[in-house]
C-alpha cells in the first residue's frame, strides 16, 4: 500500500491524515473508516488528475520499478479550466489504480 500513499504526502493529504488521526484518537471515527477515507482520497486524486489536468512537456527520463512509473519532464506546461502553470523540471510518480482494490 506504500506506493499509493504518494498523494498523502501533499499538503492536503497530510492535513487530512492529521485530522483523521485526531478523530480516531477522540473516538469520533473508527480506524477502519479512517482507512477507507484515505483510500478514497487516493482514488479521487487519481481521477481528478486524469480528467481535469492537461499537460505537455519534454520527457527527459522514465523508469518502471515495482509497478510504479516515474517520469521526469522538462519545460512542462499544466493547464486546467482556470489556470496554466509552466515548470522547468517536474517528477511524476504514477501507480496502477487497479492495484488499489487488491
Image (cartoon, rainbow, N blue to C red):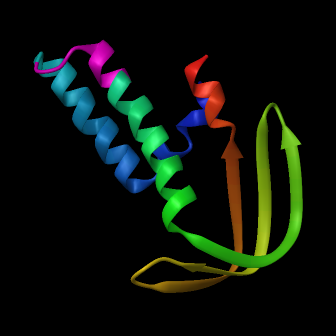
- Seen in the picture, residue 1 relative to 18 is either above or below; the reply is above
Taking depth in this image into account, of 37 and 48 the one nearest to the observer is 48
Taking depth in this image into account, of 85 and 88 the one nearest to the observer is 85
Q: Position of residue 73 (x, y in %)?
A: 77, 71
Question: On the image, which quarter does residue 21 sit in?
Answer: top left
Q: Position of residue 60 (x, y in %)?
A: 88, 71
Q: How many marks?
A: 0
- Seen in the picture, residue 72 relative to 70 is either above or below; the reply is below
Left or right: 92 in relation to 73: left
Which quadrant would the C terminus be assigned to in this image? top right
Q: Position of residue 59 (x, y in %)?
A: 85, 71
Magenta stretch holds residue 2:
no
Residue range highlighted in magenta: 28-35
Measuring 21% from the left and 20% from the top, which residue is drawn there? 24
Magenta stretch holds residue 30:
yes
Q: Taken as a whole, is the magenta stretch helix, strand or loop?
A: helix
Which quadrant would the N terminus be assigned to in this image? top right
Question: On the image, which quarter does residue 96 sit in?
Answer: top right
Measuring 44% from the left and 30% from the top, which residue is drawn there? 39
Left or right: 34 in relation to 61: left
Measuring 71% from the left and 62% from the top, which residue is drawn there? 91
- Seen in the picture, residue 78 relative to 36 is either above or below; the reply is below
Q: Position of residue 52 (x, y in %)?
A: 49, 66
Left or right: 98 in relation to 14: right
Left or right: 42 in relation to 55: left
Measuring 48% from the left and 77% from the top, which residue is drawn there? 80
Amino acid at each position: 500500500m506504500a506506493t499509493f500513499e504518494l498523494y498523502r504526502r501533499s499538503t492536503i493529504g497530510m492535513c487530512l491524515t492529521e485530522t483523521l488521526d485526531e478523530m480516531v484518537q477522540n473516538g469520533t471515527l473508527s480506524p477502519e473508516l479512517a482507512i477507507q477515507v484515505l483510500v478514497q482520497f487516493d482514488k479521487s486524486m487519481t481521477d481528478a488528475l486524469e480528467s481535469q489536468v492537461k499537460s505537455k512537456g519534454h520527457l527527459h527520463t522514465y523508469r518502471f520499478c515495482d509497478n510504479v512509473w516515474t517520469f521526469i519532464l522538462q519545460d512542462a506546461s499544466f493547464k486546467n479550466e482556470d489556470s496554466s502553470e509552466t515548470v522547468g523540471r517536474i517528477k511524476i510518480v504514477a501507480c496502477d489504480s487497479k492495484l488499489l482494490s487488491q
